[in-house]
Image (cartoon, rainbow, N blue to C red):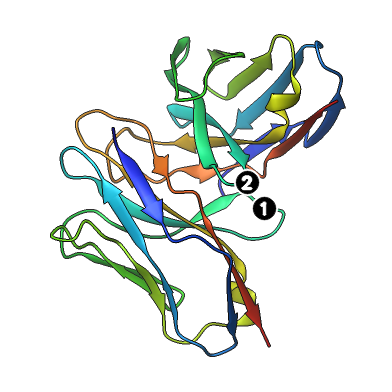
Amino acid sequence: GDSVTQMEGPVTLSEEAFLTINCTYTATGYPSLFWYVQYPGEGLQLLLKATKADDKGSNKGFEATYRKETTSFHLEKGSVQVSDSAVYFCALRTQGGSEKLVFGKGTKLTVNP
Amino acid sequence: DAGITQSPRHKVTETGTPVTLRCHQTENHRYMYWYRQDPGHGLRLIHYSYGVKDTDKGEVSDGYSVSRSKTEDFLLTLESATSSQTSVYFCAISESSGSTGELFFGEGSRLTVL
């Protein structure tokens, strides 16, 4: 079945450091890919998405490129801030009538001043 | 922000008691979902609904039932709560079934079963 594997956390960085959170997927067909973020005490919210191969999603300085050849959708940010501390979830949603979103296990990011 | 309200936000109950969590939306979205979030497991789908009275099981549906009698309300029921159902439960909604559709999440309901 469809699945998402993302790097284990937690990840701890200093402010202004470069961030990469790896995400790979297994899916039948051609999925859409998402990154969701969960700030402490809140629900998940969409960070960015890409719907086809080679698309780049971007938002709030975060970027991820849909790589079909490596089945990957790694999240990157050039300079993290303390306010980026959160749990990040990679997710996929397949075509063909599937209404479900499949999530990775989440990666907790802590950014220290 | 999407209009999604979960209630109760926090509940402590005892093993064997029934529990109902409510998700209410004001967006008139067709699709509604219940997920549970546990450390080391991420989010796992319990049940979802694709219309009034139309529901289907997710990957962890055992011990849970759902009902949707109105577009705006999606209820999750634990008929006889167990300690393994201690979790944070999230409701989500989506306007369409298309693969590009975004899910909007509620703030979560924390359930503790003693």
Q: In what element is the residue under mark 1?
A: loop
The nearer-to-camera label among 2 and 1 is 2
The x and y percentages for residue B28 are 49, 31
Q: Identify the chain of the residue marked 2, using the numbered disc in the image.
A: B
Q: Which mark is residue B39?
A: 2
Say left or right for A104 vs B91: left
- Residues packed near mark 1 inside 10 Å, few (<14), some (14 to 19) or many (20 plus): few
Give the residue displayed 16% in from the left and 65% down from the top. A54
Which residue is drawn at the image coordinates 64% and 60% (left, top)?
A39
Q: Residues within 10 Å of mark 2 (few under 14, many from 20)?
A: few
Q: Is residue B91 positioned above or below B81 on the image?
A: below
In the depicted view, which residue is nearer to us: B51 or A94? A94
Q: Which mark is residue B24?
A: none
Q: Is residue B12 left or right of residue A34?
A: right
Task: Identify residue type, mark 1.
Answer: Glu
Q: Chain of mark 1?
A: A
Where on the picture, by quarter, is residue A56?
bottom left
> Image quarter for residue A11?
bottom right
Whether residue B27 can be seen here:
no
Question: In the figure, is residue B39 to the left or right of B46?
Answer: right
Expressed as whole percent of the image width and height from the top left, the position of residue A87 reads 57, 60
Q: Secondary structure at mark 2?
A: loop
Work out how far the residue at label 2 is from the one at label 1, CA to CA, in angstroms. Answer: 15 Å
- Give the image location of residue A66, x and y in percent: 23, 62
> What residue type is disc 2 on?
Pro
Point 49% across, 35% down: residue: B93
Q: Is residue A33 visible?
A: yes
Quarter of image, res A13: bottom right
Residue located beneath label 1 in the image = A42
Relative to A101, residue A68 above or below: below
